[in-house]
Image (cartoon, rainbow, N blue to C red):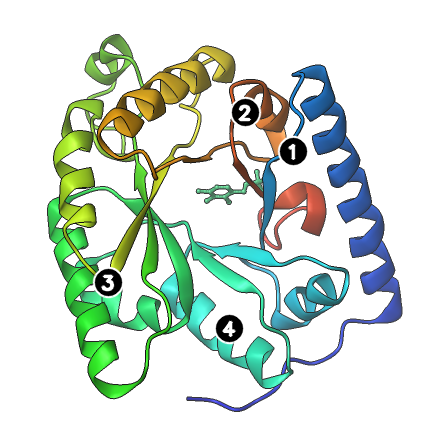
């Protein structure tokens, strides 16, 4: 594993991140009080496409949780950040191939994109193997990613990329995660469907979460809400928000 350290962000960049972070935290506070919530959801800052130096700067600004969606990018970044002495929790939020599970469990605190039984199995086996070679303090957090599209929009767009499990598959997936000593069922994750109003979609997510908790009372987390729709997610009861561009700025190369 690389022991190369993260470089330092410039003072200007660190100050910009601080300003943006405070603005997002204020939005979360305002949305929480508008929703009558006594507890604001936790913030996961999505650092994909941004360098390890930004993660290090965010960590010094008090960010405890960061999110990444590509294993090839996240693994090296996580080792640079830890070589620099910062220890944020890494949340893996992107589509994950089963053959990458072993790499992801080396740095991830949680995986938010658990969407099929084969991946549960791969994560379980990867954690088992890891436990053979090093003491593993904690089970891997697992969020079941659910496809929030309505049946009508699924039929209209049958070839759209699959964004999570069908709601009917959740119970079986949850049982599979709960059956593993090395995995911890945290709850559900979703992305608001493209071109739909996020509010009713997040309400459907809240109902699915309620149904899940009948069988798995500890699976209380709801990971939902991005830069554009965090208010709707807070109103619907999200417990974790995944915010990228409003904290980091526009993603490099994406305009
Ligand atoms: C990139 C990403 C986010 C953050 O999106 P922003 O619009 O930049 O806030 C959240 N969740 C997932 C799954 C992502 O891939």
* Residue at 88% across, 69% down: 11
Mark 1 — residue?
40
Percent across and percent down for residue 107 are 41, 71
Establish whether ligand 1 lies closer than 8 Å to the Cβ of label 1: no
Whichever of callouts 2 and 4 sits on the residue coming sooner in the sequence is 4
Q: CA distance from mark 2 to mark 3?
A: 29 Å
Q: Is residue 228 above or below residue 102?
A: above
Residue assigned mark 3: 182
Say which of 74 and 38 sits in front. 38
Mark 1 or 2 closer to N-term?
1
Which residue position holds label 2? Answer: 233
Check the image and report above or below for 166 versus 207. Answer: below
Label 2 SS: helix
**Residue 78 numbered mark, or none:** 4
Nearer-N-terminus badge (3/1):
1
Give me the C-alpha separation between circle 4 and circle 3.
21 Å
Judged from the image, the secondary structure of the residue bearing numbered disc 4 is helix
Q: CA distance from mark 3 to mark 1?
A: 29 Å
Task: Say which residue appears at 41% left-offset and 88% top-offset.
Answer: 1
Q: Residue 88 occupies which quadrant of the picture?
A: bottom right
Give whichever of discs 4 and 3 has the lower sequence position: 4
């Amino acid at each position: 594993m690389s022991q190369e350290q993260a470089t330092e962000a410039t003072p200007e960049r660190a100050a910009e991140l601080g300003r943006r972070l405070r603005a997002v935290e204020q939005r979360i506070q305002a949305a929480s009080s508008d929703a009558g919530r006594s507890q604001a959801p936790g913030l996961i800052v999505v650092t994909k496409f941004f360098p390890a130096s930004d993660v290090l700067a965010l960590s010094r600004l008090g960010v405890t949780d960061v999110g990444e969606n590509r294993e090839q990018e996240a693994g090296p970044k996580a080792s640079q950040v830890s070589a620099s002495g910062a220890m944020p929790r890494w949340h893996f939020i992107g589509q994950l191939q089963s053959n990458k599970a072993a790499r992801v469990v080396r740095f991830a605190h949680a995986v938010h994109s658990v969407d099929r039984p084969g991946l549960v199995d791969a994560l379980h086996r990867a954690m088992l193997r890891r436990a053979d070679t090093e003491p593993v303090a904690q089970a891997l957090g697992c969020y079941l990613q659910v496809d929030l599209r309505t049946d009508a929009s699924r039929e209209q767009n049958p070839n759209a990329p699959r964004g999570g499990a069908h709601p009917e598959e959740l119970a079986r997936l949850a049982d599979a995660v709960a059956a593993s000593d090395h995995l911890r069922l945290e709850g559900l994750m979703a992305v608001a469907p493209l071109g739909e109003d996020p509010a009713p979609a997040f309400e459907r997510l809240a109902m699915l979460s309620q149904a899940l908790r009948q069988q798995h009372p500890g699976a209380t987390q709801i990971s939902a809400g991005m830069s554009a729709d965090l208010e709707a997610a807070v109103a619907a009861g999200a417990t974790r928000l995944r915010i990228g561009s409003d904290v980091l700025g526009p993603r490099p190369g994406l305009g």
